[in-house]
Amino acid sequence: MTRLPDERGRFGQFGGRYVPETLMNALNELEEAYQKYSQDEEFQAELRHLLVKYSGRPTSLYYAERLSKHLGGAKVYLKREDLNHTGAHKINNTLGQGLLAKRMGKTKIIAETGAGQHGVASATVAALLGLECKVFMGEEDMKRQQLNVFRMQLLGTEVVPVMSGTRTLKDACNETLRYWVSNVDDTYYILGSVTGPHPYPMIVRDFQRIIGDEAREQILVEEGRLPDYVVAAVGGGSNAMGIFYPFVEDDSVKLIGVEAAGKGVETEEHAATMTKGRHGVFQGSMSYVLQDEYGQVQPAHSISAGLDYPGIGPEHAYLKDTGRAKYFPITDAEALEALQLLSRTEGIIPALESAHAIAQTIKLAPTLSNDEIVVVSLSGRGDKDVEAIMGYLGGNGNESH
Amino acid sequence: MNLIDAAFARVKEQGGTALIPYLTIGDPDLETSVQIIKKMEQVGADIIELGVPYSDPLADGPVIQRASERALAAKQVSILSVMNVAEQARAEGVKLPFILFTYFNPVLQLGLERFFELCLDKGISGLIIPDLPIEEDAEVREMAEEANIHLIPLVAPTSKERVARISSKARGFVYCVSSLGVTGVRSDFHSGIDEFLEDVRRSATVPIAVGFGISSRDQVERFAKQADGVIVGSAIVRKIEEVLPKLNSAAEREAALDEIGQFVGNLKIS
């Protein structure tokens, strides 16, 4: 397999840099700096140190025995990214990019956030490294994730409400890019997913691949063999790309991405970019996009603010079109069911995003035999969602059915 | 000859600076856009930029974002209807060259072949695609050359060593971005603006025009000596926004169009 992206930032036909000219040199500088420091031993050692001592890596690969028995089929392992500092996989990337920003001599960082996890992870790293930080967040998401807004503020970050367009993640991304265009001289943009213009999809994947590298090593120790399936939720797709990437060349391992179907793919309210989208250019790269026939981007919907996004990373589009990965939609209702099942069988309350991956596993595992293995990326913990879930379930988990 | 080249030649002969106003088509509606275009021609515009409303206008500030939202909310305005406005304006006697200002995705979704057929058919002379840097424009550039439609590139103060590469390939004119940031009215420009414009001038084989943030006659005059043209966008769109209630009332519509005309006319240096 050739090394992707190519020198034009392409994964096959996907990717590229569709951004205003004002940003092109900043992207070139970023790419150069990244090429340099990704080979730099001192940089890698510093990152490694923070991942281990600060964030608590490696995260465990946990055999969910009670869930597996309940589902009756494959053995289900959970890659516990929820055990990271700040409660999700997002910190893997922000530590990497925060160090990169510092090496590049930038003193200010900006970030977009949907559910708030990437915002919190950016705010955390800003505090740790002594950088000034602004996080752009849709006004709608600020309401849904008040706890994370306050968390960022506690960490000394300014949360900038985004009032344009859908007032969710999509427009938070637009607004962050607009701010970056105006302040490109001294500001580093920590993009939170494997989306956007090259080199971001590559950089974020490389900082997140530690999820898959660890999982691959851990399952070989536990089971003496590779898993049959790797399952992960996709919004922009960073935790999925991170866990998929080290398995891409292992043909026996089936890669399953799980996207948010909201109220159902047959309705207007979903975020099922792979199932219902078409090829298009959105926020800097060519990929799959939810859009109308004339290329206007459609608002997405999901119970999970982190999956509520009408685009997806270009490398996922490549994995889909080459048939290497498959993508399935999971509805809000199915995700809520899965969240409760995992809570009750394993004592783990997953983030709503990760609950989508669990829901797909609930469908998949019973169709497999007892000697098959499924590794699921449990990308984040549910603490941030508890209030929202309480709203959906009427304050009583028992009355959800 | 491409109408844009002819327009710059004529302005140069007259010793003036080309005035290139922008409007978001469909704000408040398609028919009014046709009337505003006619008015702009009457008051001295030399080339007109027709903005395609888009759901995710990355390069635009709040004024043009709002205009896009209004246009998209009111009716199903698409890239096709913007081209139909060009055709309609031409049918009503407008002689000025039209430049389509559009983000790349609407072009891509039409399909490049169909897009260029339509451009020729509807009388579009130039294209500005703000999210299509030279690294990504090879296919579009080739088809544009073939159709004799000018693909007008943007250069920014941050372009530095890219300036020569971009300007030397430019067709129509080079669009010089006067300040870092998105479109919108501002009182000051990038500190290195004069050196930047000289730099572009050195490598360009076509006229150069300045845009982003120009809103007043004073600012137009400031650039008149250095550039062959000035682009005014947000200030005009804001003017249209200001007179929206009048535009929507039968009794005051003419007065509103006159007000827009007066504003645009005041920016013309002949």
Image (cartoon, rainbow, N blue to C red):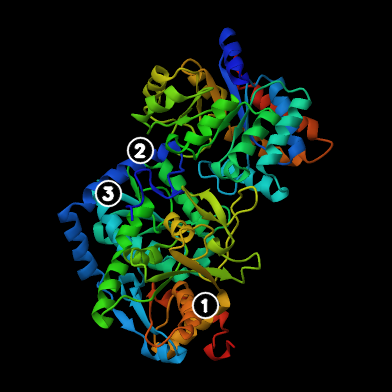
What's the amino acid at mark 2? Asn
| Element assignment for label 2 | helix
A238 left or right of A125?
A: right
Residue in the foreground of this view, choosing between A92 and A114: A92
In the picture as drawn, the residue positioned furthest to the left comes out as A42
Disc sitting over residue A25 in the figure: 2
Output the chain of dot 1: A
The residue sitting at 30% across, 60% down in the picture is A207
Disc sitting over residue A62 in the figure: none
Residue on which the image places disc 1: A335
| Pointer 2 or 1: first along the chain | 2
Output the chain of dot 3: A
Specify few, some or many for label 3: CA neighbours under 10 Å numbering under 14, 14-19, or 20 or more. many
The residue sitting at 26% across, 82% down in the picture is A222
CA distance separating discs 3 and 2? 14 Å
Query: Based on the displayed image, in which of its 4 quarters is residue A206 positioned?
Result: bottom left
| Element assignment for label 1 | helix
| Pointer 1 or 3: first along the chain | 3
Q: Measured along the vertical axis of the image, is residue B175 above or below residue A123?
A: above
Q: Is residue B37 visible?
A: yes
Residue in the foreground of this view, choosing between B149 and A341: B149
What's the amino acid at mark 1? Ala
Quadrant occupied by the N terminus of chain A:
bottom left
What's the amino acid at mark 3? Tyr
Residue on which the image places disc 3: A34
B46 left or right of A259?
A: right
